[in-house]
Image: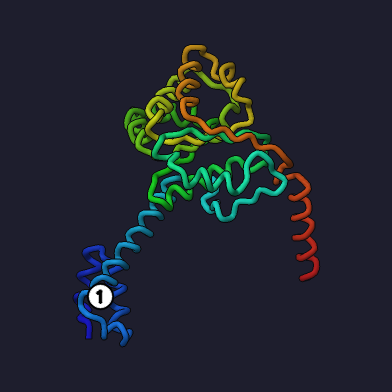
Amino acid sequence: MLNNATLTQLRALKLQGFADALQQQQEQADCLNLSFDERLALLVEREVYARGDRKRARLLQRAQLKYPTATLEDASFEAVRGIDRSTLMGVALSTWIERGETLTFAGATGLGKTWLACALAQYACRQGHSALYLRVPRLAEELRILHGAGTFRRWLEQLAKVDVLILDDWGTGPMDSVTRGDLLEVIDDRVGHRATIITHQLPIEHWHAWLGDATIADAILDRLMQSCRRFNLEGESRRTGKAARAAAKSTKAVQEASQ
């Protein structure tokens, strides 16, 4: 019989997958007929997968995605034009992260821009990349807190290491001079090295006016557009369009039928 002390020591060494697999082998007669090398290979493989799962869980938790359960597999393109499943998967499976590309999702509210951005970031985490979601209208307040605490530089250094950064609701709300300068620092650290996803309603030709300062606006746009894929979504809102109304009607019917 397996010595419980061995399992305890394996778990103390944080070899949880190895320990679980070893315990299962002892409980399965077929496994006991395998050679030492074969059993060891299975144990190591289990530990590798377990560590991979833990890493992916940490990456997803740290990403703070608005829609953490959004996945490419669940993406729906009903009544939406400007992107389809083939195009989205083509992006996800390409080297856009390694190349430090910018992706922009434009369109009216309710078309699923943020959901698609989160699905791409979620897939990136599953592939071992780090990600982070930031909502631009809240950025000014968050930056003031960081400056006040004297931690802005450290935050900037950490952000520069994030593989995929989502800047959601770009172009909504005013942009003050301090935030504008800080945003340039964020973008400058990423150009050509780290990937960025921007969701926006404001057309790109109006970004310059929104940013305000001509010099900084030129610098930000130049960096973002160096290697950029743009997707312009059109169609009905998923919250208020025909599809949303039909889904709500169907749900109501099911609820009434069950009463």
Name which residue lies at 51% across and 50% down: 68
Amino acid type indicated by mark 1: Glu
Question: In the depicted view, which residue is nearer to us: 19 or 95?
Answer: 95
Residue 211 location (% of width, % of height): 54, 19
Residue 170 location (% of width, % of height): 56, 30
Question: In the depicted view, which residue is nearer to us: 46 or 210?
Answer: 46
Left or right, residue 51 beside residue 111: left
Left or right, residue 202 beside residue 130: right
Quadrant containing the C terminus is bottom right
Name which residue lies at 22% across and 66% down: 12
The reply to whether residue 142 is visible in this rendering is yes
Q: Quadrant of residue 10?
A: bottom left
Residue 108 location (% of width, % of height): 68, 35
Q: Secondary structure at mark 1?
A: helix
Residue position marked by numbered label 1 in the rendering = 38
Residue 134 location (% of width, % of height): 49, 37
Judge the density around disc 1: few (<14), some (14-19), many (≥20) Cα neighbours within 10 Å: few
Vertical side of 24 occupied by 215: above or below: above
Name which residue lies at 60% across and 40% down: 113
The reply to whether residue 148 is visible in this rendering is no
Say how many tags the image has. 1
Question: In the depicted view, which residue is nearer to us: 218 or 69?
Answer: 218
Rendered image coloring scheme: rainbow
Vertical side of 16 occupied by 69: above or below: above
Q: Quadrant of residue 233?
A: top right
Left or right, residue 14 beside residue 148: left
Left or right, residue 167 beside residue 254: left
Name which residue lies at 22% across and 86% down: 1
